[in-house]
Amino acid sequence: MFFHTFFQHGDSWVFMGEHGRIFRTYPINTLMNLNWHWTALIVYLVICIFDFIIVPIWFGLMRPDYHTFLDEVRMIDDTMIQLELMKKLTQHHSPYTLQMGGLFHLAFGALLTGSAFGLKK
């Protein structure tokens, strides 16, 4: 079913199809209750794609060239600064959502699982 337009009329959303035929009318609270779990799923997927795919690729692409970087490190006299620069050269991305024991994934998993079981009622 394809809706051509939808608009707010009073306290409801009205979905209209071809030739102005009204298909459904939902109160605003009902419409938000129908769609919140899909929004939560999309937000969770975007965060995971960013954290596990995009950021590690960016870390890999932005890593400096080893030979030129080591030449610059050797020119510095202070060993503590050399140590910190070497840490920057060898550092890896640790996903932000896995910090604190993966509580982020546990919370979103509970939220999405609870909403999936609630849909069957």
Image (cartoon, rainbow, N blue to C red):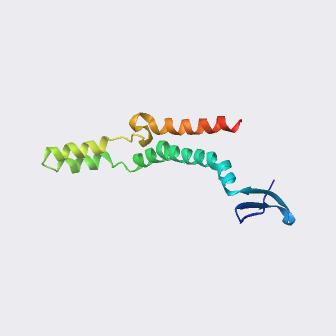
Give 24 or 2, whichever is nearer the viewer: 24
Please name the residue shown 39% across and 40% down the image: 94
Q: Position of residue 110 (x, y in %)?
A: 55, 35
Give 116 or 46, whichever is nearer the viewer: 116
Number of marks drawn: 0
Please name the residue shown 21% across and 48% down the image: 73
Q: Quadrant of the rendered structure where residue 120 is?
A: top right
Q: In this rendering, is residue 57 above or below 19?
A: above
The residue sitting at the front extreme is 11
Q: Is residue 71 left or right of residue 99?
A: left
Please name the residue shown 47% across and 39% down the image: 104
Q: Position of residue 80 (x, y in %)?
A: 16, 44
On the rendered image, what quadrant is the C terminus found in? top right
Q: Is residue 121 left or right of residue 81?
A: right
Q: Position of residue 35 (x, y in %)?
A: 66, 49
Q: Position of residue 82 (x, y in %)?
A: 19, 45
